[in-house]
Amino acid sequence: MKQQVVTIGLGYIGLPTSALIANNSINVYGVDINENVVNRINEGKIHIVEPSLEGAVSKAVSTGFLKAGLTPIEADVFLIVVPTPFKDKNEPDISYVESATKAVIPFLKKGDLFIIESTSPIGTTEKMASLIFNSRPDLKNSIFIAYCPERVLPGNVMHELVNNDRVIGGLNHESSLKAASFYRQFVLADLHVTNSRTAEMCKLVENSSRDVQIAFANELSIICEKANINVWELISLANKHPRVNILQPGCGVGGHCIAVDPYFIVADYPMESKLIGTAREVNNYKSFWCSEQVKKSIIKFHLEFNRKPIIAIMGLAFKPDIDDLRESPAKYIAQRVMQDSQDEYFYIVEPNIDNHPVYKLTNYNDAIDKADILVFLVAHKEFKNLSISSNKIVLDFCGVVSRN
Ligand SMILES: NC(=O)c1ccc[n+]([C@@H]2O[C@H](COP(=O)([O-])OP(=O)(O)OC[C@H]3O[C@@H](n4cnc5c(N)ncnc54)[C@H](O)[C@@H]3O)[C@@H](O)[C@H]2O)c1
């Protein structure tokens, strides 16, 4: 009998994954609570921006291997790919994973494989197993349950889904092996088998590791400012040591992964995760510090030239060359500086966005030409190799000017 897969959640991860599996001639039924998403996918179209995804979805739908709906159906494999945001006080919210699990429970049968891909706090897979077995004791020891986190880079998802190594953590060894043989059908890279808790922690640790390393660079940048040392030169020189590799500082850390996932560890292990928690604080503080530097510079200009400066905020995205503003430290800095401004005029520049509902955006050449203070927050490619007149005050928090 032909294999049937059900994916719950058809967003940035669930949809590309569904299309990939379907294009390997496996029947996929994608489920989403958003009716517009379901309708669009059934038309072979997509609702998110991701290179090569539209072609993959359109092919999968036209060959009949991918269909979408609002409620699950019976299947052999269930993949949970719903959001795991955080609630107040930076605590993980696993309610989406819980409701997705509850939705599939009536459809589970002996021999099925249930996999969670959503980034999840440690112990979530065990919790979902209890949820399943409490309402379906008949399934105990007769279904396979595993956790397999996703580590793709937005913008390169279709390639990385196939070519990134995967960590697969089963509730028991049989579940790990069953899940590994499922992924083997469409993943070319290595599959590493472990238990569910280690796999959950692995995903959180990958992003926490980046966060801690960036925090070190950000801390150095604040010390260097006070010590009157060029941090970019310092890091470049320190990195000449064969075993040192310091990352570059920025205006903070943003996005929906690195700025979020470490809290999933800190919330559950506050006493044991001092370094991880402090790194989050350092990176958040860096954004606050940048906004204070801008405010100081505005006051200094006013006192020196006896008029209010024009300020250009260069970049709003959470990292270079993308249009994503989620958890963006640049956006936070822009908001904070403008909130506290005394009628100064601001140009807001974000070359990756044409129109924004809140910010009136300006072309970067115009802003550079007209502003007195240039605040570089994101190292977008457009900001590299600019010719900036020497009478401008430049605050470069991302090294896009100072590193040239
Ligand atoms: N986007 C990334 O780059 C990325 C990378 C690695 C890991 N992750 C993780 O993958 C998971 C999914 O992230 P995403 O970016 O795909 O999220 P997303 O918000 O793009 O998509 C989630 C989809 O799930 C749907 N949904 C929510 N509850 C549902 C339910 N009960 N039943 C059916 N559908 C439901 C939503 O309508 C939405 O379409 C998260 O845990 C995220 O942390 C994301």
Image: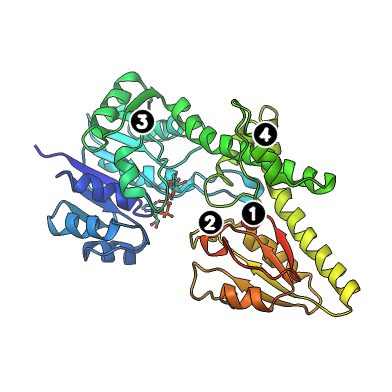
Q: Earlier in the sequence, mark 3 or mark 4?
A: 3
Residue 286, placed above or below residue 373: above
Mark carried by residue 320: 2
Q: Nearer the viewer, mark 4 or mark 1?
A: 4
**x and y percent of residue 49 in the render?**
37, 61
Q: Earlier in the sequence, mark 1 or mark 3?
A: 3
Locate the C terminus by quadrant: bottom right
**Residue 35 position by quadrant:** bottom left
Mark 4 vs 1: CB contact within 8 A: no
Q: Which residue matches tag 4?
A: 238
Q: Nearer the viewer, mark 3 or mark 2?
A: 2
Q: Which residue matches tag 3?
A: 146
Q: Nearer the viewer, mark 2 or mark 4?
A: 4
Residue ID at (62%, 29%): 244
**Residue 391 position by quadrant:** bottom right
Q: Nearer the viewer, mark 3 or mark 4?
A: 4
Q: Which residue matches tag 1?
A: 398
Q: Identify the amino acid type marked 4.
A: Ala
Residue ID at (64%, 56%): 329
